[in-house]
Image (tube, grey):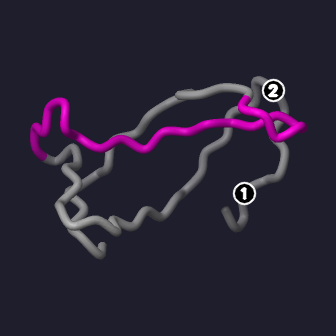
Amino acid sequence: MPGAPANVPAGEKLQLRVRVKNNGDIVWPGCERSAGQFQIYLGSHWLNASRQVASKEEGRSPLPADLAPGQ
């Protein structure tokens, strides 16, 4: 991700802005309406210095709005 730091010290908080594109054929439901179990969330997987998965599911954020195909 351009502009993201290559390293983050353990325990330090980091806030990132990301851009997501729906390359599929159906709308991804966001949090502006109750999508229940089908709501899409953005999550993270972090790698250690050896590029091995260090942690999964550190936090999840819902899409702020529905994301149509191509958006």
Kind of residue indicated by mark 1: Ala
Q: In this view, does 28 lie to the left or right of 49?
A: left
The stretch of residues the image draws in magenta is 33-53
**Figure check: 54 above or below 69:** above
Mark positioned earlier in the residue sequence (1 or 2)? 1
- SS of the residue at dot 1? loop
Mark 2 neighbour density, 10 Å: few (under 14) some (14–19) many (20 or more): few
Checking the image for residue 10, the label placed there is: 2
**Residue at position x 84%, y 44% from top?**
7
2 or 27, which lies in front?
Answer: 27
**Residue at position x 74%, y 27% from top?**
54
- The mark tally for this picture is 2
Kind of residue indicated by mark 2: Ala
**Residue at position x 89%, y 38% from top?**
49
| Magenta stretch encompasses residue 52 | yes
Query: Residue 39, position in %: x, y?
Result: 22, 40
